[in-house]
Image: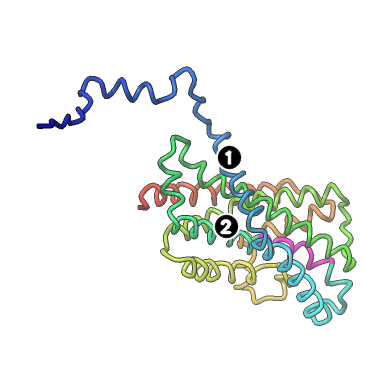
Amino acid sequence: MATTTQPQAPSREAEPERIRQILVAPQDRPPRSGPLSACLTYGWRALLKIKHVPEQLFDVTVFPIMMTVMFTFIFGGALAGSVDQYVQWLIPGIFVQTLIMITMYTGLTLNKDISKGIFDRFRSLPTWRPAQLVGALLGDQVRYTLAGVIILLVGFVMGFRPDGGLMGVIAAFVMLLVFSFSVSWIWTVVSLSVRSEQAAMGISMFILMPLTFASNIFVDPSTMPSWLEGVVDVNPVSVVVTSVRELMSGVYDVGSMMTVLIYCAVLVAVFGPISMVIYNRKS
């Protein structure tokens, strides 16, 4: 009669030793990434997404050209008497409007990633938790830069000539990138609070439309009713448009620039912590 030998389960004392033999030795493990390294890594992931899905650049290439050409030729003759005069007023404003509207797609992309469960994996990693959101926003700075360069090139072709020269344009560009990064935290809160990409887009457009059109992008606020002029003057978009126009004209008003930076600090201080609270509680 043949006998069958059953495999013996490892003893309770031998199991930790077996696991230690599989794991990398403590001295050979890579050091834990710091906040800056983690942010840059997640930012690089956002850039790789652009590389593998280049069609998502449609909104930062075709959209800026369409907006600049359309608004200049439609409103130029009616509002300023000629396209040549209006383009000097419009380009800094359309520059701001386009980049702010593109920030909305940061929230939509984030909502899409979360719905796929990618961020569930990220949250299990031993990295600085805010880096997962900060890195995504930093990666999108490349998209903002590309859109801004296209707008300026189209503006130069249409006759825009900033009196501040190259330094004024670069200073305005840097300030607008900082403001765009700060505004992106609003869409982070929106994208983390809703369950679908369509809902995130609807709420984002509801916020964006009054912010961009009730501003000094297209017309001088002095032509508006007094009650609306007061609203336009405190609108953060109007404040940053005024500062960008000044920098491109060669005027470096410290008070105007500080006002923009205060708005940026308030946006990050308010919406950054709210984003992290929702992100940590989201299942």
Label ID, residue 259: none
Q: Nearer the viewer, mark 1 or mark 2?
A: 1
Amino acid type at mark 1: Thr
Q: State the residue at coordinates (64%, 68%).
A: 212
Q: State the residue at coordinates (20%, 23%).
A: 11
Q: What x and y, as percent, mark residue 103?
A: 61, 59
Vertical position of residue 63 compared to residue 241: above or below? below
The N terminus lies in quadrant? top left
**Residue segment shown in magenta:** 88-99
Mark 1, residues whose alpha carbon is within 10 Å: few (<14), some, or many (≥20)?
some
Main SS type for the magenta part?
Answer: helix
Is 111 inside the magenta-drawn segment?
no
Instruction: Give the residue pinned by disc 1.
Output: 41
Q: What x and y, as percent, mark residue 114?
A: 45, 55
Label ID, residue 106: 2
Q: State the residue at coordinates (40%, 52%).
A: 278
Vertical position of residue 63 compared to residue 34: above or below? below
Amino acid type at mark 2: Thr
Q: State the residue at coordinates (80%, 67%).
A: 89
* Left or right relative to 220: residue 116: left
* Left or right relative to 57: residue 263: left
Query: SS class of the residue under badge 1?
Result: helix
Q: What x and y, as percent, mark residue 257?
A: 70, 48
Measure the C-alpha gap from mark 1 to mark 2.
17 Å
Vertical position of residue 49 compared to residue 131: above or below? below
Task: From the viewer's side, name the closer residue of 238 and 97.
Answer: 97
Q: Mark 1–mark 2 contact, CB under 8 Å?
A: no
Res 50 → quadrant: bottom right
Task: From the viewer's side, name the closer residue of 92 and 55.
Answer: 55
* Left or right relative to 22: residue 254: right
